[in-house]
Structure formats: structure tokens, C-alpha cells
Amino acid sequence: MANKAQEVSGIQFPFPYTPYSIQKDFMTELYHVLEAGKIGIFESPTGTGKSLSLICGALSWLRDFEQRKRQEEARLLETGSVSLNDGKAHVLAQSSPSQESPGSTRPAGEPDWVTQFVQKKEERDLVARLKEEQVRRKKQEERLQQLRHNTQLKFAAKRVRQEEEEMESLLRLSREMLAAGAGAEQLESGEEELVLAEYESDEEKRAANRVDEDEDDLEEEHVTKIYYCSRTHSQLAQFVHEVQKSPFGKDTRLVSLGSRQNLCVNADVKSLGSVQLINDRCMEMQRSKHEKKSKEEEKKAKRRRQEGQAACPFYNYGQMQLLRDEVLVEVKDIEQLVALGKEVQACPYYGSRFAIPAAQLVVLPYQMLLHAATRQAAGIRLQGQVVIIDEAHNLIDTITNIHSAEVNGSQLCQAHSQLLQYMERYGKRLKAKNLMYIKQILYLLEKFVTVLGGSIKQNPNTQSLSQTGTELKTINDFLFQSQIDNINLFKVQRYCEKSMISRKLFGFTERYGTVLSPTREHPRLTGLQHFLQSLQPRVAEAAPAPAEENEARALRPASPLMHIEGFLAALTTANQDGRVLLSRQGILSQSSLKFLLLNPAVHFAQVVKECRAVVIAGGTMQPVSDFQEQLLACAGVGAERVVEFSCGHVIPPDNILPLVVCSGPSNQQLEFTYQKRELPQMVDETGRILCNLCNVVPGGVVCFFPSYEYLRQVYTRWEQSGLLARLAVKKKIFQEPKRANQVEQVLMEYSKCIKCCGRMAGTMTGALLFSVVGGKMSEGINFSDDLGRCVVMVGMPYPNIKSPELQEKIAYLDQTLPRTHGQAPPGKALVENLCMKAVNQSIGRAIRHQKDFASIVLLDQRYARPPILAKLPAWIRDHVEVKSAFGSAFAALRKFHREKSGPS
């Protein structure tokens, strides 16, 4: 495929083929958004080459930006001077976001000679900094060029050395306390790793661990880059493959980031299954790696390694340096990165992070970018950078879910029991501050159980609650009701992070919770063992299926305290931005405390504030009012900074037939409200409509229902009435499975059936797939060509308006967002938008390329309302036909499919 450079509005866009006109418009608008530092909302339907437009548009801008920067650097270094009044100097200032901008406003009334002196100094500093950056860049380019010829390089490891020194300091403190533990009982081999080190707050060690800046530390220089994030690892891998095939595939320094679960190459750690367990074991093995052991400890160290505390052999800096450079030399996806890690015996998780500063394009999942603590831990710096968030139709929900947290009564009781036993075991070896914070955490856990109506001293599985139901509280009201308003949760949260108490506790319970049998030597641990065993769910008599066993293992719970730490962190949110939901279910173990984030903008504000530009992109972004009002306006983004771009589809207009059907064959009005949708006549009319559609639509028909429960009711009714048998004459019937691991098998059989029917002329013309809106098949799965010749939407999938969470969100929006004259209140608009976003995602499963064709049938007369129609994607909305009678709708469908595929 020959690369063809396209010039649009004076901008050169390298492209692998001649782009569609909408792709040219997309790239041009994207280029201008990045250049002007705007916030862009981009909508480009699936099948229009959105990924390639993003790649070529964004990387063309980065190419030109870097070229302008280097030209200006060369000019300034040649003359040896710079004028801060020169507009070109701002390009250089913007490219180094970590530095203070030169030429900042001086205090009023300052003497001219002072102003001139300061300005001259700033100019000299800028020239000196440019020289340093040029030297660093040349060294980096030489290093990567050498790597292409397999030359080994020296690894600059200031950050790593500092990390080792901090860990050694912690372990040294632990060993000193163990040696001086007068009156404390003797610990077993390896048990010292479970004891907390002396805790020092940040304020108490201001002058500690100061390390001079190293000019040769190439890893600390963050070049201007583009962060691209999407929802799933498969979507990220697909994007990387598009980069590899693009004209930029050979020259772009790209790094793919992922979780330990996706990148770990240590078979023993990977086999743990649970994300949290993998994270915990990785951290424990790092500490083992950092610890320097004396000769006297060698025998103990060998025993520890046998007990699973060995240092990870892949956590090797020399090899990770090699892996980092290999990543920067050639574009690799996650699978290729893992394969390289195994080949060079280096950790891909840490090796990829070392490549971030020098990378031009960083590919990462949503959570890693949108969560501040995760960003910081990964070494991601957003200052002055570009962020592209793809598949962003669910961005608001994603931010909300990332920062919400829920804990149940069983977790609270389990964490309290574990921590109490830990304190009894090691109390004499712990310093005063550790004991103080542990007692505070125990107090918090006890009060959380009490506010649910339970007792920390009883088994949560058998403990009945006198009061049931749900209750919503503001954060402050919850703190007062729980009697914990006198505790500084910020300090408790910081202690949990710094001391790693939850990881220590997990190691403690892993060691004694299931290993120790009751003996006279450890009488206090016997109670813990019995209690932990009582919290385990009852094992069914029948042996689980292998698939179920693997799934259960993957969901294996980690330390309950680690889970509770997330809830404690959530409680530090501003009072007006969140709520606490108390759910009392009769039994303490099933009752829960849930933090609800009402204002996702508070977490997104930091992203838009720090970044040079942010692009929010997707195939179906309508309705965009949610992004503008709930996310951007509330994050302080002015309307003048927001740019909205939406393009049409690449298919000809006559390749799509969207219909709103208001009544059925027997003139039954179609309105699937909660009150009417379960009526027998409504269910039967829906079945008759599908029978008619299956008679004229070839290939595959995908029918979406509002919920699993409604699908079950409809299916049962049709089975009893014989309607299902009538449908099965024309189409083989498939249902969306409830288990995620069965989806691929169902799709394979569905596809196979359609292909067989297409080859064999018979009564059966294809297959009918029953799916659920928001389910496993409403996102990320393509029903292209014969797999989706018709998509049917039964009713409007409004969310449950009785949900306490939704009711609180509606009330919050009505109170905080201004109401526009002539438009629905913000809360009502939210409900409609949630519904239509789900609809748009589902009907977008069809029409996947330029020559594809399909009909879209919306079964509900409410779709005909102008405010609802306006929320459909433009490429569908502009062609919608509203049919009040079923006869005219059926005739249009029959004509459409006959013309496109011949007589059925």
C-alpha cells in the first residue's frame, strides 16, 4: 500500500491511501485543535477510518511542532541570544512545560534597570537550557541509533537508585526494631517482612533523600508527546497495529502501557489470577530484590525464597534498560512487548514505564490516565502534553466508576479481625505512631459496621439487622453519623499509602489465615483462623465446572483492607461532590457502604488544566451536551476553548434505511414504557413484527431488548405461544449468553449459521440474535455485512429512575447546572441522554465499511419525538423515516432489501 502525502490547507498529511473527504476534514480540524490548544469533541462513525485520521492528523502536528522547535533552537543557538518579546520564543517555552515560562509579568513599579537585568538573565537561562536539551536529544538519538546495530548502552538509573535507597532504609529500620525488640516473642523465619517499619510523615522528613539532578539522566526529560487512551486492551492493540501500518510506523517512538495482569512475564505471579494479588506479590518481590542481606542472613534468605518471597528474576535494571530502548526503536503492541520481555528476561511492566519520557506516542488504558494516583505511579506527566481519549462515549461513567467505591459488611469485619490479630501479634515491636494509626483504622472499621446496624464482634454472615433499606447521606452527614468526624482521614489515607499496611496485612493473613493449624504456640491466631473460615462461602456439593472454577479464581479476593482504603480515599472528596449510600439488606455481610461521585469534573479538571490540548473522540458521541455541561463547563473550560466536529458516514445514503415504527401489524401502538411493555398484547405484537421482518431480511437480524429480565419474559411468552417456533422457520435463534467467556462461541455459531444459509438455498435464510442494550454485544462487536443486515431496537432503554444513585445524580444536576430556557431540566436531559447513548451504541453495530448496507428499526413511537430524534447520530438522523402504520414500514423494508440483495 503506497503512502500518499495529502496537502490540505497547506498542511502535509502522509496517508497510506487516498483519504475520504471526511478524513481530510477530520485531520485538518484535529491539527488546528492541537495547534491552538483547544478541547475537541470529535465524532466519526465506525467504518470511516477514525483511527487512521487520528494517527495521521495528530502525528503530522507533532512532526511540524518538533520541526519548528528545532529550527527556532538552531536560530537562537547560532545567534547566542534570544528576545523574550519574540513570539517564536513561546514555541520553546511551551515545549518545556516543567520550566517556568520566561518573560512572566514583573511587579508593578519595579525600576527599569531591575526589569532589564531580570529579563537578560531569563534570556541567558533559556539559551543555556536549549543547549542542554540539544545535548540530551543528541545523546538519545545516538543511543537509539547504536541500538539498531545491537550496541549495549550504559543505563542512567538515578530514579532507580533513589528507589533502592528508600527501600533499604525502610528495611534497615525494620531490622533495627527486630534486633531491639525487648520483651517481644521470637519471630519465625520470614516473619520480619510482615512487621511495619517506623512511620515518618512527609512533614518529618523534608530534608531526606535529596538527590542532585544528573545531567545525563535521559529518562527524566519528557519530550512533547501524545497520550492516546481507549477503553480496552484489544482496542489499544488495534490502534497500535494501525500506527504500524501508517506512514509514521517506522519513525514514531511509541510505548504501550498496561496493567501487571497484562504485562507480567513471571509465571508464578501471573498464575495468582486476581489483579490485586498479582500487584501485591509484585511489590513484595521488589522489596526482596532491594534488600541487601548480610552473610548471617543468607540461610534465612534461602528459606524465604523457598516460601515464595524470592526476588523477581525479571526485575533487572540492565535488561529493563535494553527492553526500554528496544521499545523506542520499533513500534510494538502489548503482545509483542510481552514476547520481548520473555526473550530478554526483563519486566515489560517497568521497562515500558522507563520509555515514557522519550516516547512521542504513549498508548494506555482509560484508568491509567484518568486516575491521578495511577498517573503519578506510572510516571505520566501531562503538563503541556496532548491527550486523545478515544471511544469516549462512556467517559463520564468511566470517571465516575473509577472514583466510586463500595465496601460490604463482610469486608469490614474481616479487615477488623485481621488487623486486630496483626496488632496483637506484633504490637510490642511496633512504634507508637504505627500503633496510633492502627487503632484509628480499627476505630473507623468498627464505626462503619455500627452505622450499618451491626456489631464488629459477631459473624457478619449470621448477623441480622433490625433496619433494612437504603439511605443517602452527604459526606459530612455520614462522618457525623458514624462519629468519625474527629479523625483526619487525609492523614490516615497517607499512612496507608506510605506504610503499605494493607500489603503487610495480606502477607500476615496469607501466612496464618489458612496455613497455621491451632497449636499451643499460637493460641491467639486460632480465633483468626476460625473467623476467616467462617467468612468463606459455603461450598456447593457439586463440583464446579472448569470454566467456573477458573473464573472464580480470577475473582479471588485480595486484602479487604486494601479495598477499604479506596473507600477512605473517596471520603476525602469535597462534601458537595459526592454522596454515601448506606444499603442495609437484612444480613450484615450483604449490607454495604457505597461512595457515589456526583461531579466527575473535579477529576477531569486537572487533565484539561495541565494539558496543552485534549481530544475526546468516538464513533457515536451524540448527545454531546453531557460532555459540554457535566464535564467541561464544570471543569472550568470556557465555551471558546471547546471545538465540536462531527462528520458523516462513508456509505452512500441509499445503503441505510432507519425507520421509526409506531404501530404493529394489528395496529397496536408501540410504546414500551415500564407500565405497558409487559402486557401480553404488546409482547405478542413485537413477535409478529419480528416474524414479518425475518421474512424479508436476508442474513442476520440482531434484536436488542432493554434488559435481561425483559428478554427472559418475552422469550418465555413466545415459547409458550408458539411464536418462537414460527420465527425459527426463517431464522435460527441465538441468545446473548450471561457468561462473558461464552460470547465468542455464540458469535462463532451465529456467523457459521448465516454463512451456511447463504450458500444453501432453503427455507431458513439466516439467524436471529437476541441481545441486551448495555450487554456484552452492544459494544465493541461488529455485525458487518450479512451478520447484521437489520438491527431492531425494542423500546427505549431508559435507566431505572427509581435507583437511589440516579435520583441523587438528577437532583445534583438540577441544583448545580443552569437551566436553559425552552429545554428540559438538566436531570431529565441526563435520563434521556443515558437512554440515547445506549441506543446509539447498539444500532452502531451495523454498517462497518463503505460498501455495507443495513436497515435500522426503532420499535417505539417515542423515537418520533423531535428532541429524541435530535440525539441520534447525524448520519442516521438525516435519513430517518417515521412510519405510523406498520404496512408502510414493511413495504419500505421489503423494497430496500430486495434492491440491495435481490429477492429473498
Image (cartoon, rainbow, N blue to C red):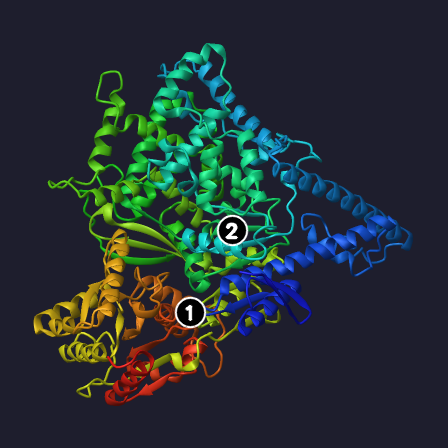
Of the two numbered discs 2 and 1 on the same chain, state the one appearing first in sequence.
2
Residue 113 visible here: yes
Compared across the picture, whether 836 is left or right of 499 comes to left
In the structure shown, which secondary structural element does the residue marked by tag 2 occupy? strand
- Residue type beneath disc 1: His
In this orientation, which residue lies closer to the viewer: 229 or 769?
Answer: 769
Label for residue 344? none
Residue 196, horizontal then vertical, whole percent: 44, 27
- Determine the residue positioned at 40% across, 16% down: 302
> Pointer 2: what residue?
363
> Pointer 1: what residue?
849
- Determine the residue positioned at 53% across, 31% down: 319
Compared across the picture, whether 213 is left or right of 260 comes to right
Q: Quadrant of residue 717?
A: bottom left
Residue 573, horizontal then vertical, whole percent: 47, 52
- Residue type beneath disc 2: Val
- Determine the residue positioned at 52% across, 68% down: 42
Residue 190 visible here: no
Q: How many marks?
A: 2
